[in-house]
Image (cartoon, rainbow, N blue to C red):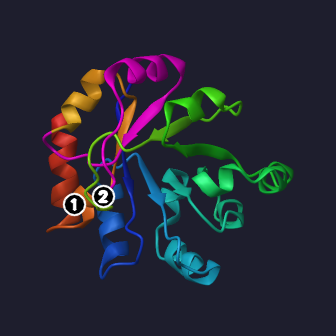
Amino acid sequence: MKFELIVITPEHILKDEIKDVKRLFENHLDLLHLRKPGSSKAELKKYLQEIPKQFYKRIVLHSHYQLAKEFSLKGIHLTEKTKKSTNLITQLKQKKIKIISASFHSVKDIFKSRRKYEYIFLSPLFDSISKKGHKAKFIPEELKLILKKQKVIALSGINSENIRSVKQMGFAGAAALGFVWEKGDPLKNYKELYSKIK
């Protein structure tokens, strides 16, 4: 099974971000999680319009879910909040919007979940780079149980020093945010991560 490297966008739109996103797609990026919690639907729509259409099937949306159908994106990601909204999930099913993934922060919640996702994000695996105070909390025995249950993507604190160990632990992939966007050239940072898992 291929180990997937996913990039999550920063919360706020950065200068040259869309140009950088295009460069990432052109350099083997499997999936981009478009996460802009403070952005309006119009802002997200403008963002998507600036990305070439051939990359739409590699984008998963975290908000303003109706845009997923409008732009023929891969699908949507349920956050902690949206995952609990049965009304929203019913509406998404009616509109045939594909739910791809969801976030989990505890082992207990994963085992309680009855919904099947293509993959899930589990965090914090390591101390977060982008969210200060977001500390690692899982023990190896717990992780082994989860990794047997379904396809899990490691999230939080992913960097070039620990991504190989994430792969060795049996995770299906890793999602990077802070390491890619917070210092220097995002493409260079991404390539550094990618080189460790080839």
- Residue numbers of the magenta segment: 134-161
In magenta segment, residue 51: no
CA–CA distance between discs 2 and 1? 27 Å
For the N terminus, which image quadrant? top left
In the foreground, 86 or 68? 86
In this view of the protein, can residue 5 be seen by the observer?
no
Whole-percent x and y of residue 110? 57, 32
Q: In the rendered structure, which amino acid carries the disc numbered 1? A: Leu
In the foreground, 101 or 75? 101
**Are the two marked residues, 2 and 1, in contact with CB atoms closer than 8 angstroms?**
no
In-image side of 102 versus 124 (left or right): right
Rate crowding at label 1 as few (under 14), some (14 to 19) or many (20 or more) other CA atoms within 10 Å: some
Instruction: From the image, tell me which residue sits under label 2.
Output: 133
In this view of the protein, can residue 36 be seen by the observer?
yes
Whole-percent x and y of residue 86? 80, 50
In-image side of 12 versus 78 (left or right): left
Whole-percent x and y of residue 80? 59, 52
Instruction: From the image, tell me which residue sits under label 1.
Output: 187
Locate residue 189: give its quadrant: bottom left
Write the residue at 72% across / 65% down: 66
In magenta segment, residue 150: yes
Write the residue at 62% across / 35% down: 117
Rate crowding at label 2 as few (under 14), some (14 to 19) or many (20 or more) other CA atoms within 10 Å: few
Write the residue at 54% across / 19% down: 149
Q: In the rendered structure, which amino acid carries the disc numbered 2? A: Gly
Q: Earlier in the sequence, mark 2 or mark 1?
A: 2
Which of the two marks, 2 or 1, is nearer to us in this view?
2
In-image side of 101 versus 162 (left or right): right
Using the image, determine if residue 75 lies above or below residue 46. Answer: above
